[in-house]
Image (cartoon, coloured by chain):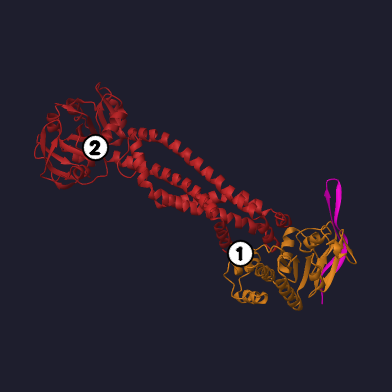
Chain colours: A red, B orange
Amino acid sequence: MRLLKIAYKNLKRKKIRSLLTIGGVSVAVAVLVSLLGFNSGYQLALNNDVDKMGYQVLVTAKGCPYEAATLMLKGGGGMRYMEENVYNRIVQDERIDQITPQLMTTVYNAGKEGGGGFTMYMGILDSYLVLKPWSKFESGSWFSSEDADEVIIGYEAAELEQREVGDMIFIPGKEQILKVVGIFERTGTQDDGVIFMPLKSTQRIFELPNQITGIGIKLKKLSDLMQFEEDLYDEASIQVISMAQVKGTIMGLISSAQILVTSVAIIAIFVAIVGVINTILMSVFERTQEIGVMKAIGASNLDIFQLIWYETIFICLIGGVLGSVMAVLAGNLVEYFVKALLPYAPAGKLIYIDAKLILSTQIGAVVLGLISGVYPAFRAANMRPIEAIRSGE
Amino acid sequence: MRTLIEVQNLKKHYQRGTETVKALDGIDFAIKSGEVVSVVGPSGSGKTTLMNLISCLDVASAGNLFINGQNVTKFKEKQLIKIRRENIGFIFQKFYLIPSLTVKENIELPLIFAKKDFDEKKTQTVMATVGLQQKDDIRVNMLSGGDKQRVAIARALMNDPQLLIADEPTGKLETQVRDSILLLFEELSRKGLAIFIATHDLDLAEKTHRIIHLQDGRIIPKVESSLY
């Protein structure tokens, strides 16, 4: 304990040098915490997004399956269409527990906040709510008929458009006015930004008669999934995408980026270790006489080893704490950039930093200190007192 | 007075290239408790080597060194550390205090290494002995040279040593401060502490109980002062 106090005071002797070294460790730790937080956060958010789609299988028109799945997840233009008859055929399958057709389309809205943007519209049936039982109404209720000129707005879209139940909305380019009959509660998924319409109204207004973009299917037994997919391969115009595959593929794509960022984090940690060793070694050399005197007045090799080791552990621990704080504080900013850079970012928090992550990072920082301190501490501990005292004379 | 240090035919030889340097070449003397002994001699005479051997900071090539009746010449480093902790206090010309610590923290440093509990009463007594009352929390780099040496003496006294080894203890101090340090040494010797001083300062040496004159690694009757 008393050696700890001396070690702490030693670090204060060269404040700027100590602070710079702590800064290096902090940056490395912040990168590491953000990366690990992103690892778990992205997976959680993706799982949440995919699970809250409510179905295990997505049927879309032929094309790139993952592009289709991503478009379904995040919305956007360029959707491929398929005949509604496909839905009518598949719905007969006894293995299906729930099924819902969707028609997704986007419209460019020049008046949208932030200099214009796309608004997503989705045509649905009431089976949509059966597949997504967590979709509750914040206010209002379901459409009055299957062909009503009405909309239900996702929570964020309602906030963005500043609309309440009873208000009217206008679809740019379609010269169509629709009445808001409901607003969904926040779900934490992409659905929050969507404007929902009855399927038939969507087909009519967007001039896509008998067209749909996807069919979401939930099976009675998950074990039937492979056979079910295989049976649907016979349909020439469609493709079947399992949501488990989508998760795997998106995580696979993200893992390539993670490898790159992990490499950067490893380099940052390596640079931090070298920085710590350099600082402590310089400090040891500057205090050679002092160490010699300590040994003369009774310090053992172990005492000196501990003293120098404590100094490195202090640097790494303080750096670890500051780095974690930096990661937490800068989390939103990092998330903003990550979301802007990634081709698909799930809704919700992408960087998930919890107490377990912080704790394991602090343990990691201490281990970093232990490793970095070994060589300088060993050098200091093995100095011969006479030579050390004479070194500055 | 009992014999505290006994040196018998002590030698320290080492190689410098092909040449054998005889830093100490067979010296004999003894120091009793309460005795203040100075060792004088020109540069290269072997003063520092002798001091390092008696301090157990270096090992002799031959001969015997008894501290408190124990022959330490064959001791291993761990045993030498114990001897240093329990028997010897050090005072250096350049003080060698830890600048980041306060007066009190510097003085208590030997207790940390000896794994002893802090004893406030004792610390205050030692501080009073050397004239450092009320200066507990002052950082040592704020002190005058004289006060720094007092801190060094207090630090040397904390483990109740039987021998105080001082290397040019007044070398960097003004005359008035030097005299007060010498008075302090006298007072400590009266309490039974043996003090061994290596110095170039003949005035200082003459105020000690006994002078050992060294030249070329040997004890001689007297060294001409012009050689210093």
Residue lying farthest to the right in this orientation: B221
Which quadrant is home to the C terminus of chain A? bottom right
Q: Amino acid at mark 1?
A: Asn
**Residue A115: mark in rendering:** 2
Judge whether residue B68 can be spotted in this image.
no
In front here: A365 or B157? Answer: B157
Residue interval drawn in magenta: B1-29
Total marks drawn? 2
Q: Is residue A355 above or below residue A258?
A: below
Depth check, front residue: A308 or B181: B181
Local packing at callout 1 (Cα closer than 10 Å; few below 14, some 14-19, many 20+) is some
Disc 1 element: helix
Q: Give the image location of residue A160, x and y in percent.
A: 21, 43
In this picture, residue B198 sits left or right of residue A103: right
In the image, which disc is placed on residue A154?
none
In which quarter of the view is residue A179 placed? top left
Q: Left or right? Give the position of A164 relative to A292.
A: left
Instruction: Establish if A356 lies above or below A219.
Output: below
User: Residue at left 61%, top 66%?
Assistant: B140
The residues bearing labels 1 and 2 have C-alpha atoms spaced at a distance of 64 Å
Is disc 2 placed on a helix, strand or loop? Answer: loop
The N terminus of chain A, quarter of image: bottom right
Query: Which residue matches tag 1?
Result: B141
The quadrant where residue B34 appears = bottom right
Q: Main secondary structure of the magenta part?
A: strand
Q: Indicate whether residue B13 is drawn in magenta.
A: yes
**Dot 2 falls on which chain?**
A
Q: Residue B14: x and y, percent?
A: 83, 52
Say which amino acid is labelled 2. Gly
